[in-house]
Amino acid sequence: MKTVLCVVGARPNYMKIGPVIAALTASGIKAPLVHTGQHYDAAMNDSFFTDLGLPRPDVNLEVGSGTHAVQTAMIMQRFEPVLDEIKPDAVLVVGDVNSTIACALVAAKKGIKVVHVEAGLRSYDRAMPEEVNRVLTDQISDFLFTTERSALANLEREGIDPARVHFVGNVMIDTLKAHVGRSVPAAVTLKDAAFADGYTLVTLHRPSNVDVPEVLARLVGCLAEIAAATPIVFPIHPRTRARIEAAGLMAKLTGPRVVLLEPQGYLNMLGLMSAAKVVVTDSGGLQEETTALGVPCLTVRENTERPITVTDGTNTLVGIDSAAIMSAFKDVLATGGKAGRAPELWDGRAAVRIAQVLSAAL
Ligand code: UD1
């Protein structure tokens, strides 16, 4: 029996791994799970395992937070003996977080095949830590599974043999389709905050937005202005909360028209997204999930590594300029926003295609 060791580390990995483990297991491949411990707060971690019905990790490396170098190095150091013990035929990593590159690198150096799920996405912005992780992970991967056709051209430009690349669709949408029927209604999450006219759902956590004080102040200013038009629901990532508090900006986000929440579980977040008038975000995952749900999304970034959400989906890149953000927001309120359609192969069967390729090849 072949073994594909699956790795997760941070929140955006959790909604990608469930269908992959299920499909591998169904095709007769053993799929043990390693958690690096990059995310560890209950709100960033535990609730996702429960909501998504993920298996308990077989190993937890418990690395926790640190600088990028410390975090990456610690994952590598602790992952190597796990490979010596489990001796998998391949290591499967998802997405673009520090855990992704760290475990891929250890496996590649030990001559173990590397499988990258969500390969080939590029923002072409090397200041983004995830972009460095994406480029490097793809270079050392043996199987590259892509979510949209544009990824192949990105990979070919970097000299990657197209024979290693397989366009399979989006495993995060497999998860969404499997769970959307169980999502927690927004009214339950929002309790007594009754927003009859709808609300804007906000998430922000990219270092380029929240770690630069001027940018953060500008974005919080926009949120205050948005709240004057429609109430805001804002589940806050721990780093964002810390930065907003440190900058003394919390006062701008208080009042009856702003609901600040702890980071939400997956099923609550699905409910909040589905009922939102518009989503304002810098998250990669939310750009894709709003496209799948048909909810307009304004992405507060200068670029996106997920262009299909803009060309086919409901996403609009609005940048980080206040006037541009506010004009795009008003446009959504006036027109209802982009309609969009489901991207090719975002049909809930991506993981099955991955398992077919791997069971034939390993
Ligand atoms: C990471 C990913 C990012 C992803 C995001 C989703 C990288 C490079 N970045 O960013 O792609 O979109 O996760 O959340 O891997 N913290 C806690 N509790 C936790 C985890 C983090 O309080 O459970 C705080 C710590 O202060 C930590 C900070 O958040 O220093 C940042 O965490 P880290 O894992 O380094 O990166 P994220 O910003 O979460």
Image: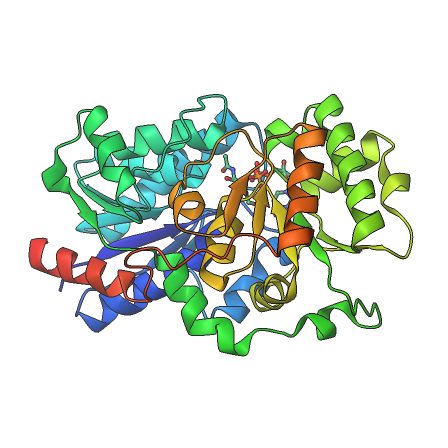
Vertical relation: 157 (above or below) 32 = above
Tell which quarter ligand 1 is in: top right
Residue at (91%, 52%) from the top-left corner? Answer: 255
Residue for point 82% across, 31% down: 246
**Residue 101, picture quadrant:** top left
Left or right of residue 214, residue 123 in this image: left
User: Outermost residue, front direction?
Assistant: 335
Q: Position of residue 162 (x, y in %)?
A: 13, 37
Left or right? Give the position of 299 relative to 193: left
Vertical comparison of 52 with 94: above or below:
below
Q: Is residue 177 visible?
A: yes
Residue 242 is situated, as x and y percent measured from the top left of the image, at 76, 37
Determine the image quadrant of residue 270: bottom right
Q: Is residue 8 above or below residue 239?
A: below
Between 87 and 238, the one nearer to me in the picture: 238
Nearest to the observer: residue 39 or residue 184: 184
Q: Position of residue 41 (x, y in %)?
A: 64, 52
- Which corner quadrant holds the C terminus? bottom left
Quadrant into which the N terminus falls: bottom left
In the foreground, 213 or 18: 213
- Residue 109 in sight in this render: no
